[in-house]
Image (tube, helix red, strand yellow):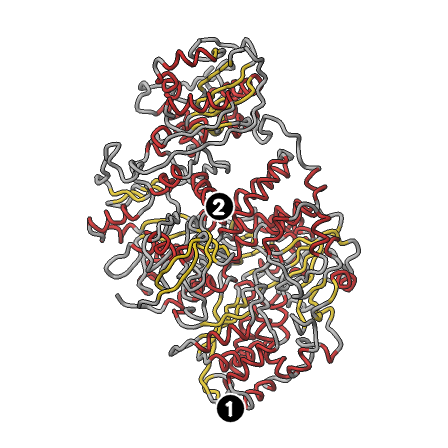
């Protein structure tokens, strides 16, 4: 079949074979349509929706479009770009994605898209739904927390008899991919590996076959572009010859982000030229002695003291920046959001492997901060003005953002500074 | 790989559900073997439909409608009565497994709420007294079919006899004689010229659909009647099936004749199971009279027969591709839109899916004659339309009206005293206010539906929309001043969260997040930014969702924000730097309780 037709993509006229898949046609002509569920044109799944484009003014998924004469296609309008970002954000908000602890990090299609789109925070509140990690299958692990329900495995992984190994169960917000234990055992090792590699995220793992690749050798390490965060109109209350006043704190975090703060070595002296530190673990000043221009928050809110400190920061600082994943989405401490609080306490004080034998006391005193039912991202407690993602964020990244916000300058972050997994 | 026909799968599951009241582990093993599918895939099919249960659902399974119309009609006291009478709370089964009490979305009886189904037999106009009476009769050994109600048709209005299309006396088989005159192409041409469009709510030109299907060559083609009337507030198809099922069968025979289909099916929603037996009897009568099977008494003889496929509780199956998947024994997920059903539909063959009302209209158009039919209604939408009316009005029930009636006149007709807002076309439709009352119910001057995101204020809306027609698949719910708009929106949001199929993230999680925003509004924690978020998020959900469910789920919500700003204004709290939804006391309540319990025995 060599039936050539003309179509336009974002105003550019393109010649293509009639009936070919739009995503492929665009790619051939140097136009990138991001995809997540799509991997071969024989059976487009159209589940992830990020390839949504406008065909003759109508929204539709690019992966299901077969090109035809005269089609006018929009790929990169501001609205469509934002739609795509919104969907990736929604997938992050819906699942429980902890990149630093994920085997697929660096090889994950979704993570790559997030980097590519310069995602710093999701506009949606995290759902924190309780999903299970299923170790029961003989050969595989099904990590539902990371599953984006793209349906690749459901459609593609079959036994010799043609039966589905993976299936969708339940519906709506409760939809999950489940693995059939009996049929899973029938898969050969290479078929199991294929299933793992088919998964665009880290939901399907094969026991003992998870290869740790060094940083720099993973699929997406060398890709990526600079991002240009937006500086908003700031409400800084600063006199002309006054230094900028900075405060920092670590809530439910590991202090790793604070370590990163110091990682700029002697450049720190330049910072001290224009800024002074007030309340901060760096100065060991425990209480605010004056109003601050900017507050840097590490960690989310795990207990009542975190909440009190965060609220104090909001009151005393003109601008509040959440830096590091824990402050942005709860991070590693938020993994306890799927475990009932009582079990957490019992594990920590009574039954854990590191507790003393015979331990039978759970500390409770009015002076001890109270644990919250969940770990909350900072923006669920107070308004946050800026987000610096990372675990920890790169030191250059942090200070570039802080400096640019304070001076009201435009800035860009290189991919290397932005990438942290 | 052996191919097993899975179209019987749902029937098999139904058989077990009906007999055993749940689908057990062993049943799954057995069925999976029979249909050569994995156990987990079968589990996926079963858990997709909410009338299939994996645990015992009670010998008498009670499904109480939880739609907003039912709530406003007194559902609360009825629910309390049920809970008291059987001794368990909603969502549970009594210890002796005699009763199970569950909620379900609209069951197509909105004009006689509160209503419920017990073992899929209808009970309407419930009161606490009636509930106690029903339960005690069931305990005394009566069966639901012996004591159930027969739902009223409540036909409140039809145009004058010579202008009525549906509800006037009709003689069985009479329209079929027209097929002696016409070629299939001529039937299609007639339907095309009648400008008949899909009456389920999508309004796709029926004649065109038939023509596409006719032109696709295949050894077998299918006609499917979509009787999965799931849109809350709609019951016009139920009334048609009660009053004139013969029109439907004849419409399907005509469709089959026109497109060259040899097989047909009626996809009947499980909520209408009580209509199955009478329908089957009627089908047998058509068969006996030579109108199904080998049909010779027409210009070009052909083979055609049909059966009834029962749904099992999934709103999304009203979407035609989801419906087809469901008939194929799969999860009722909408298709990718790569092909239309007329190209590759049921079992990959060209398929026409039409709504009950659409199919019923065809024999009537032939009977009335094209010229006379075109004289009814408006230019773009000739003929009449059925509307199911419920809510705050004197005369809820079914209305057949000529297209072109002003909304204001219609409100008078139904006896709506102080209409404040209207859900037009169900939960997936528009929310109308007095700004819309002078619009007419017709398909004239339509605009694209994205326009709702571009209005700045109600005044601009009224100006731009004044001459624009209004179309509804059949649902018309009217609410007066005493009803809380936000409560209605909450019911809608809950509905879409429960009914989203889950295949695409904007609909699956987007609707869930919108629902959270509404909760925020109800609790008084919302700020102006939350309303902006609702608008922005809705737009994303609308443009990126796979099927009509996601595309329409937030329409009413956004209409309401535009048209009733004062309702939302009064629920907003002031902008602050703090997130009002976070409450330290609530967040530490668990801890206080646990620590109290755990440390109480220390001293």
Horizontal relation, residue B372 to residue B214: left or right? right
Which residue position holds label 1?
Answer: B299
Q: Name the residue: 35% across, 51% down.
A: A27
Horizontal relation, residue A385 to residue B331: left or right? right
Which dot, 1 or 2, sits closer to the camera? Answer: 2
- Along the line of sight, the residue nearer the viewer: B83 or A156: A156
Residue B208 percent location from the top left of the image: 53, 73
Corner quadrant of residue B568: top right
Corner quadrant of residue A251: top left
Q: Name the residue: 72% across, 77% down.
A: B163
Residue B599 at least partly seen:
yes
Residue A92 percent location from the top left of the image: 43, 39
Q: Where is A340 relative to B241, above or below?
A: above
Q: Which mark is residue B362?
A: none
Which residue position holds label 2?
Answer: A83
Residue extending furthest toward the left? A189
Q: Name the residue: 51% across, 46% down.
A: A79
- Neighbor class of circle 2 (other Cα within 10 Å; few <14, some 14-19, many 20+) is many
């Amino acid at each position: 079949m060599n039936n050539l037709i003309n179509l336009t993509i974002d105003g550019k006229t393109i010649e293509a074979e009639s009936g070919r898949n739009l995503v492929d046609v665009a790619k051939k002509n140097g136009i990138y349509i991001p995809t997540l569920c799509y991997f071969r044109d024989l059976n487009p799944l159209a589940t992830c929706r990020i390839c949504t484009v406008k065909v003759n003014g109508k929204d539709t998924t690019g992966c299901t479009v077969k090109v035809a004469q005269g089609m006018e296609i929009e790929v990169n309008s501001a609205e469509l770009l934002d739609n795509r970002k919104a969907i990736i954000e929604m997938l992050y908000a819906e699942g429980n994605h902890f990149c630093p602890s994920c085997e697929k990090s660096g090889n994950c299609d979704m993570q790559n898209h997030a980097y590519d789109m310069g995602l710093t925070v999701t506009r949606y509140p995290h759902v924190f739904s309780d999903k299970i990690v299923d170790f029961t299958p003989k050969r595989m692990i099904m990590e539902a927390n990371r599953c984006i329900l793209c349906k690749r495995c459901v459609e593609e992984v079959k036994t010799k008899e043609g039966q589905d190994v993976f299936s969708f169960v339940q519906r709506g917000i409760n939809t999950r991919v489940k693995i059939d234990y009996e049929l899973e055992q029938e898969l050969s090792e290479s078929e199991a590996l294929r299933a793992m590699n088919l998964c665009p995220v880290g939901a399907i793992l094969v026991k003992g076959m998870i290869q740790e690749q060094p940083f720099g050798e993973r699929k997406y390490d060398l890709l990526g572009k600079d991002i240009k965060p937006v500086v908003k109109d700031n409400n800084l209350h600063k006199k002309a010859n006054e230094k900028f006043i900075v405060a920092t704190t670590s809530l439910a975090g590991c202090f790793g982000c604070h370590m990163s703060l110091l990682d700029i070595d002697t450049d720190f002296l330049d910072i001290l030229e224009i800024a002074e530190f007030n309340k901060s673990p760096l100065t060991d000043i425990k209480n605010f002695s004056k109003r601050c221009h900017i507050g840097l928050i590490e960690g989310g809110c795990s207990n009542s003291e975190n909440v009190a400190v965060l609220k104090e920061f909001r009151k005393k600082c003109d601008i509040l920046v959440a830096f590091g994943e824990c402050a942005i989405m709860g991070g590693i401490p938020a993994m306890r959001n799927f475990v009932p609080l009582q079990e957490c306490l019992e594990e920590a004080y009574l039954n854990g492997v590191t507790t003393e034998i015979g331990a039978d006391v759970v500390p409770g005193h009015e002076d001890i901060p109270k644990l919250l039912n969940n770990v909350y991202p900072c923006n669920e407690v107070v308004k946050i003005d800026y987000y610096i993602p990372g675990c920890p964020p790169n030191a250059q990244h942090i200070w570039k953002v802080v400096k640019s916000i304070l001076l009201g300058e435009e800035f860009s972050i290189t991919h290397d500074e932005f990438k942290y997994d | 790989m052996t191919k097993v026909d899975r179209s019987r799968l749902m029937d098999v599951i139904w058989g077990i559900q009906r007999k055993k009241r749940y689908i057990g582990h062993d049943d799954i093993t057995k069925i999976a073997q029979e249909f050569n599918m994995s156990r987990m895939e079968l589990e996926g099919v079963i858990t997709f439909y909410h009338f299939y249960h994996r645990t015992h659902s009670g010998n008498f399974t009670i499904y109480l409608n939880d739609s907003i119309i039912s709530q406003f009609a007194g559902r609360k006291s009825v629910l309390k009565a049920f809970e008291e009478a059987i001794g368990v709370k909603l969502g549970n089964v009594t210890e002796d497994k005699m009763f199970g009490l569950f909620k379900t979305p609209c069951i197509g009886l909105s004009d006689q709420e509160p209503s419920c189904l017990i073992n899929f037999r209808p009970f309407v106009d419930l009161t606490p007294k009636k509930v106690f009476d029903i339960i005690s009769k069931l305990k005394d050994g009566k069966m639901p079919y012996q004591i159930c109600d027969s739902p009223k048709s409540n036909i409140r209005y039809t145009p004058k006899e010579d202008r009525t299309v549906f509800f006037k006396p009709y003689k069985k088989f009479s329209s079929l004689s027209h097929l002696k005159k016409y070629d299939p192409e001529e039937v299609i041409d007639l339907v095309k010229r009648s400008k008949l469009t899909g009456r389920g709510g999508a309004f796709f030109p029926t004649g065109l659909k038939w023509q596409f299907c006719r032109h696709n060559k295949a050894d077998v083609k299918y006609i499917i009647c979509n009787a999965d009337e799931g849109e809350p507030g709609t019951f016009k198809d139920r009334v048609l099936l009660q009053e004139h099922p013969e029109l439907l069968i004849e419409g399907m025979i005509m469709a089959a004749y026109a497109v060259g289909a040899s097989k047909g099916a009626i996809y009947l929603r499980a909520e209408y199971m009580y209509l199955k037996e009478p329908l089957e009897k009627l089908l047998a009568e058509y068969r006996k009279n030579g109108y199904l099977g080998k049909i010779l008494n027409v210009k070009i003889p052909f083979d055609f027969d049909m059966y009834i496929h029962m749904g099992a509780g999934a709103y999304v199956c009203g979407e035609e591709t989801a419906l087809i998947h469901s008939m194929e024994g799969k999860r009722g997920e909408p298709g990718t839109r790569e092909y239309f059903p007329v190209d590759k539909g049921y079992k990959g063959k060209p398929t026409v899916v039409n709504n009950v009302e659409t199919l019923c209209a065809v024999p009537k158009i032939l009977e009335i004659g094209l010229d006379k039919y075109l004289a009814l209604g408006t230019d773009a939408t000739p003929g009449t339309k059925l509307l199911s009316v419920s809510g705050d009005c004197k005369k809820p029930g079914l209305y057949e009206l000529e297209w072109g009636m002003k909304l204001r006149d219609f409100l008078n007709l139904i006896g709506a005293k102080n209409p404040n807002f209207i859900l037009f076309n169900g939960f997936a439709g528009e929310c109308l206010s007095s700004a819309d009352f002078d619009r007419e119910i017709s398909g004239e001057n339509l605009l694209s539906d994205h326009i709702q995101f571009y209005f700045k204020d109600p005044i601009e809306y009224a100006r731009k929309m004044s001459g624009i027609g209004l179309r509804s698949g059949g649902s018309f719910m009217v609410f007066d001043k005493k009803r809380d708009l936000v409560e209605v929106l909450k019911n809608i949001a809950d509905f879409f969260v429960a009914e989203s199929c889950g295949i695409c993230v904007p609909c699956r999680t987007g609707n869930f997040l919108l629902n959270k925003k509404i909760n925020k509004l109800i609790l008084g924690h919302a700020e102006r930014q939350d309303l902006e978020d609702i608008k922005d998020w809705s737009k994303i959900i609308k443009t990126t969702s796979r099927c009509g469910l996601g595309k329409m789920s937030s329409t009413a919500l956004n209409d309401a924000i535009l048209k009733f700003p004062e309702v939302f204004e009064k629920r907003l709290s002031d902008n602050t730097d703090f997130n009002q939804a976070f409450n330290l006391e609530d967040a530490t309540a668990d801890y206080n309780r646990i620590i109290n319990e755990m440390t109480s025995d220390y001293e």
